[in-house]
Image (spheres, rainbow, N blue to C red):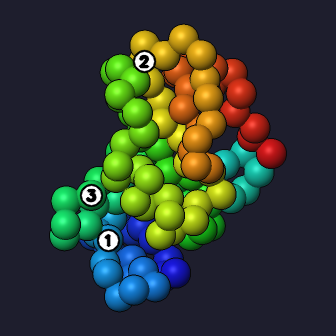
Amino acid sequence: MSTLCPQPEAEHVLLEAKNRSATTTTAPRLSALYSSCGYRCALCYIRDKEGHEVDFAILQDGVLEELIEVTYSDAGISPSLRYFTERLKPKRATQIVATLDKPYDKDSIRVTNPFRYFADVDYQ
């Protein structure tokens, strides 16, 4: 996997195993931030030519840590989140649902509400 989002306001291409590309765009204010542990962090979104899109891709030192899709109601796991999770194999994949009462896991994807997501975040 190539390095993603190394420069602010730049558009980069991630080549997947099957030679499909996913365009990623940085969030300019976050691309050069460092975590409290000294890691270079980036916040991006991912979109491909077929229209699959995920709201957030979190990178640490150029490595995909987590994909996050945000929805208001739980109508099942987002097809785009499932698509990119299967192909990019991030360390974590999460769908945050505003109105969800009880979190659950399905197909390596955590579905949770925003309060639970931020309460359960492991910063190490």
**Closer to the N terminus: mark 1 or mark 3?**
1
- Residue in the image at 72% along x and 45% along y: 36
Residue corresponding to mark 1: 22
Q: Quadrant of the C terminus?
A: top right
**Closer to the N terminus: mark 2 or mark 1?**
1
Q: Amino acid at mark 1?
A: Ala
Q: Nearer the viewer, residue 23 or 84?
A: 84
Q: Is residue 15 among the parts visible in the rendering?
A: yes
Work out how far the residue at label 2 is from the one at label 1, CA to CA, in angstroms. 27 Å
Q: Residues within 10 Å of mark 1 (few under 14, many from 20)?
A: many
Residue corresponding to mark 2: 98
Residue corresponding to mark 3: 52
Is disc 1 in contact with disc 3, using a CB cutoff of under 8 Å?
yes
Label 2's element? loop
Work out how far the residue at label 1 is from the one at label 3, CA to CA, in angstroms. 9 Å
Q: Please tell me whether residue 22 is drawn above or below residue 75 in the rendered image.
A: below
